[in-house]
Image (tube, grey):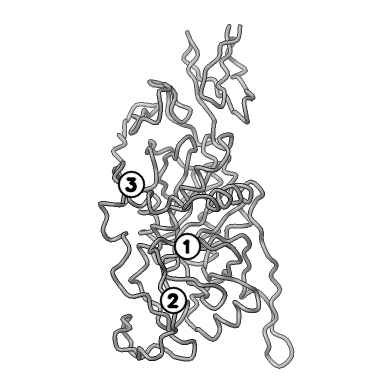
Amino acid sequence: MDNGRRWREDHARTGSSPPPKRKRTSHNGPSSVDNGIQNGSAALRCDQYNIAWICALHFEMAAARAMLDDFHEPLLAHATDTNTYILGSIQRHNIVIACLPTAQHGMNNAAIVATNLRRTFPSIRLGLMVGVGGGAPGMADIRLGDVVVGTRVMQYDLGKIVGEGQFEGTATWRIPHQSLGTAVSVLRSKHELEPSRIPHILGEKLERQPDFLRPRLRDRLFSATYNHQVPTGSCDECDPSKLVPRSTRISGDPVIHYGGIASANQVMKSSAVRDNVARRLDVKCFEMETSGLMDTFSCLPIRGISDYSDSHKSDEWQRYAAAVAAAYARELIEALPKTHAQTQAVDLPDSRKLVKLQLIGNVSRSVCPTFKCRSKYIASSSSTIARLT
């Protein structure tokens, strides 16, 4: 793997005098403006964050932290917000990372986290649900460590009981926002001509974190009619003759799959039910959170495959699967138009007040109405500050 920048721990200071200051932790270019902040000016505001990155498990949050270029100072949350955040940036996109509470998973808890996040960060428009998921190997050649990107999501356990106890689903497909869909299209077109940057990103960001590297374990897929034989997670005592024969891949790099994802409030550990639901809905992955987020803000699920949604499910591939999902999320964020997160706070001369320039494209939104300034500053999308008289 290529050597590059290493994952740096957050060394943000917790100053006591308002407004809080922050130091730049990396240098992405010659400009004096970094993520909408001039050297020596105030910290970012809550309304300057536009992308939410949500995880369900702590090691998924660790992989997300590793993807950031910079870490930002913590901000005061809304009085009713119970979340704890990691703030930072990828290139010029300001990111809010949040995680579900320990041992509290599922769609309801995901919805609570998303609702609280929107209270504190009202400008969030796009969400990424990034973490591990269970594959549906009968629908594609899906292997452990692959990535499934959900172009549509359905809550498959939402419905009614009819007739003689038959379940009839009533949920409908949820589609991520068009801006996320177009970014996915751009990235897919790029991957038609050149490989994904996932291996490079992993080498750059997580090379010194061995727990997140690809396991030296055999990727074993058992027949759908063969259940796990022992109470422990290891399949060492399972019958090798029940393994599904599969061709050996030339490369060990993860393959990216696009398609439907099935979401529910329960873990899928039945190969028979897995195959039935996957065929009925045409899905490639099972997970437990995204449907709970879709009513709060547009969300794209990105899942690293850590098991095959059967009785042989174990934790051995989870951290690597979380890492490849996070690496894809970073690559996708790099493909987003720069206008999604370019809000800048600029200190005007001879004033103690800040003028907030909310940028969409190159348009300046507002100037503090109580301050009669002689000059206005407009920050363009190329980070150039132009003075207008």
Q: Is residue 210 above or below residue 15?
A: below
Of the residues under marks 1 and 3, which one precedes in the sequence?
3
Mark 1 to mark 3 CA distance (whole Å): 19 Å
* Spatial separation of the CA atoms under disc 3 and disc 2: 30 Å
Q: In the image, which disc is placed on residue 204? A: 3
Q: Position of residue 87 (x, y in %)?
A: 42, 42
- Image point 36% across, 52% down: which residue? 202
The image shows residue 138, relative to residue 375, as above or below, that is below
Is there CB contact under 8 Å for labels 3 and 2? no
Q: Residues within 10 Å of mark 2 (few under 14, many from 20)?
A: few
Across and down, in percent, residue 9 comes to: 29, 44
Q: Nearer the viewer, residue 230 or 31?
A: 31
Mark 3 or 2 closer to N-term? 3
Residue behind mark 2: 247
When the figure is inspected, residue 129 is found, relative to residue 106, above or below; the finding is above
Please give the residue where the numbered disc 1 appears in the rendered image. 255
Density class for disc 3 (Cα within 10 Å; few <14, some 14-19, many ≥20) is some
In the rendered image, the residue lying farthest to the right is: 163
Counting residues from the N terminus, which is met first, the one under dot 1 or under dot 2? 2
Q: CA distance from mark 1 to mark 2?
A: 14 Å
Task: Give the amino acid type for the residue marked by disc 1 in the picture.
Answer: Val
Location of residue 98 in the rendering, given as x and y in whole percent from the top left corner = 45, 51
The residue mark sitting in front, 1 or 3, is 1
Q: Residues within 10 Å of mark 1 (few under 14, many from 20)?
A: some
- Say the numbered circle drawn on residue 146: none
Q: Residue furthest bottom?
A: 164
Say which residue appears at 39% left-offset and 88% top-offset: 228
Circle 2: residue type: Ser
Does the CB distance between marks 1 and 3 fall below 8 Å? no
Q: Helix, strand, or loop for circle 3?
A: helix
Instruction: Classify mark 2: helix, strand or loop.
Output: loop
